[in-house]
Image (spheres, rainbow, N blue to C red):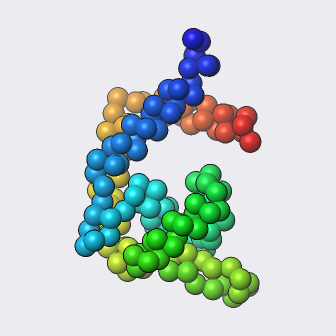
Amino acid sequence: MDNKSKFCVELKTLVNSICRCIGQNTFDKEGKSLTSIQIWIIHYLFDNQDRDVFQRDLEIDFNVRRSTVSGIIQNLERKGLIQRQSVKQDARLKKITLTEEAMTLYQEMLVRITSMEEKMAENITDDEWFVFYQVLEKIKRNIQ
C-alpha cells in the first residue's frame, strides 16, 4: 500500500483517536453532559464572539449536514448553553450566542481542550505544522 492510498486509513485512525480522547474526558457538569461535537461548537462560538454566527456557518465550518447541526443546536439550547436571537437585517435569521452559563463552562472545558492540543502537538516543529496545514488545505480543495 503506497502513502497516498494509506492516507484515508491513517486520517480515520487519527480522528478516531482524537474522538476517543475527548470521549474519555466527557464533560459533565451540573447534569449537562456534552458530546465532543457540542464541546467543539461551544469552542467555536466562543472564538467567534466578535461576529454573528448562524446555523449555516456551523454547517460549513464543521462540514456537517443541516439536520445534524439543527439537532446539536436544539440540544445545546435545551441545556441552556446557547440562545438564538433574531437579527435586524433579516428576521428569519437567528444568530447563535453562548449563554453566561456556557461562558463559565467554557473556561473549564478550555483547560481540557488545551491539554489535548498540547499533547497532540508534542515534538512537532513550526515548519512541520506549516507543511501539515498546507497539505490539508490542498486535500480539502481537491475534494470540494
Residue at the spot x=28%, y=51% of the render?
25
Where is the N terminus found, in terms of image quarters? top right
Residue 86 vertical position relative to residue 28 in the rendered view, above or below: below
Against 44, residue 4 (above or below) is above
Whether residue 76 sits left or right of residue 113 in the image: it is: right
- Would residue 34 appear left or right of 60 to someone viewing this image? left
Between 3 and 115, the one lying in front of the other is: 3
**Does residue 90 appear in the picture of this structure?**
yes
Q: Residue 7: give x, y in percent of width and height.
A: 56, 24
Q: Is residue 30 left or right of residue 40?
A: left
Is residue 126 visible to the viewer in this orientation of the structure?
Answer: no
Observer-nearest of 80 and 97: 80
Q: Residue at x 73, y 34 (%)?
A: 142
- Residue 79 occupies which quadrant of the picture? bottom left
- 27 shown above or below 99: above
**Furthest residue toward left:** 30
Q: Position of residue 144 (x, y in %)?
A: 74, 42
